[in-house]
Amino acid sequence: MTRRSIAVTKHSLGFVLAMSAVALAGQACAQQEAVHTIARFEFEGGAVLENMKVGYVTYGKRETDDANVVVLLPPTSGLKSWANAHIGHGRAFDTDKYYIVSIDSIGGGTSSQPRDGLGTKFPAYNIRDMVRAQHELLVSGLGMKHALAIGGASSGAYQALQWGILYPGFARGIMLYAGAPRATSHVKTIIDAIVATLSLDPAFTPSGALVVGTETVRRASTVYFPWLFSDGLLDTQSDQQLAGMESNFADVWARNWDAVGLSMRYKSNRDFDVAAPFQGSLDEALHRVTASVLILPVTTDRTHPIEMSSLMRDGLSHARVVYAPLDSIRGHSAVFRPPGTPEYDFVSTQTHQFLSTLKK
């Protein structure tokens, strides 16, 4: 298939002060929450974990031919609830139309993680390990042979793109929100700073316990916080407003993560590069993607600059590409905005339109 790039007119977005960080408030009613166990999982680095858990939740009614399956993958510090605000009757992931499977990636939520007992001895994992475990869940656990679409935001987009490369043809569509084909040196240095801060936690000592929401986790959140937004937004905030935004973001991390688990999750992102298995050839990696692809970057994103999305768009020569830049002052955080905001409406509209073309 010849690549066809569809440009979407940039949407002029308003400014709102309320901090939403990277968690969406949603009222999606879960149909089934469960865990699939993989008897023996071998990580790319060679380590083996027996009885590895892959947690997931489903919404909607599954069609017999799986033609309505939509798989959602979480961002780095997110869990399977990350997209709840877009799931439900009449929303982008309409439960009257689609069967949604939202997965907890390795290392967090109800999936296997350091807090299960191994602590710092939990096997190091990467994005490809996550995707292989997700594939095992869908194929062996749920008996699926294909899906309508697979999508994710931020490092969830890492995973979705990796799906298109590892398992071309499994999904008709790939949705990439504020993603990138690799972790740049800029991202690596941010991760290094986050991990260095988390390593100060008592959990990294021989007798340390893994405790959710320690002060170390909260302080590590401040390392990443400024990269979520543009200078244009941050410069409009008073010191009091900035302090409130930082505190809200720290609450998001403290709610679900211990220092070891969060450190390993960020390390899993550090060396992400879809080109690595192809002798560094990004073109060769992207040429494997045959699905239709929605690329939704943010014009002011400082974590994954829009140039990285343009690079993906140009390299997906065997895919039909819908390229829809979100023009927002909110930077990387824009794709996680709640209902009632222009950013939410843009993400919802583009997702709805993209999924509708796949169903035809």
Image: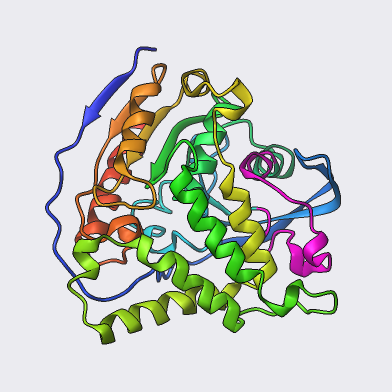
Q: Residue at x 21, y 66 (%)?
A: 233
Quadrant in the picture for residue 40: top right
Is 308 in front, or is 116?
308
| Image coords of residue 284 (percent x, y) | 51, 18
Horizontal arrangement in the rendering, residue 190 relative to residue 6 (left or right): right
| Image coords of residue 301 (percent x, y) | 31, 51
In the image, residue 223 sits, relative to residue 245, either above or below, namely above
In the image, residue 306 sits, relative to residue 92, either above or below, namely above
Question: For residue 335: magenta?
Answer: no
Is 248 in front, or is 174?
248
Q: What stretch is highlighted in magenta?
A: 106-132
Which quadrant, please, contains the N terminus? top left
| Image coords of residue 113 (percent x, y) | 73, 61
In the image, residue 223 sits, relative to residue 242, either above or below, namely above
Q: Which residue is drawn at 49% across and 71% down?
A: 221
Q: Which residue reaches farthest bottom? A: 240
Q: Which residue reaches farthest top? A: 2
**Residue 60 visible in image:** no
**Residue 48 visible in image:** yes
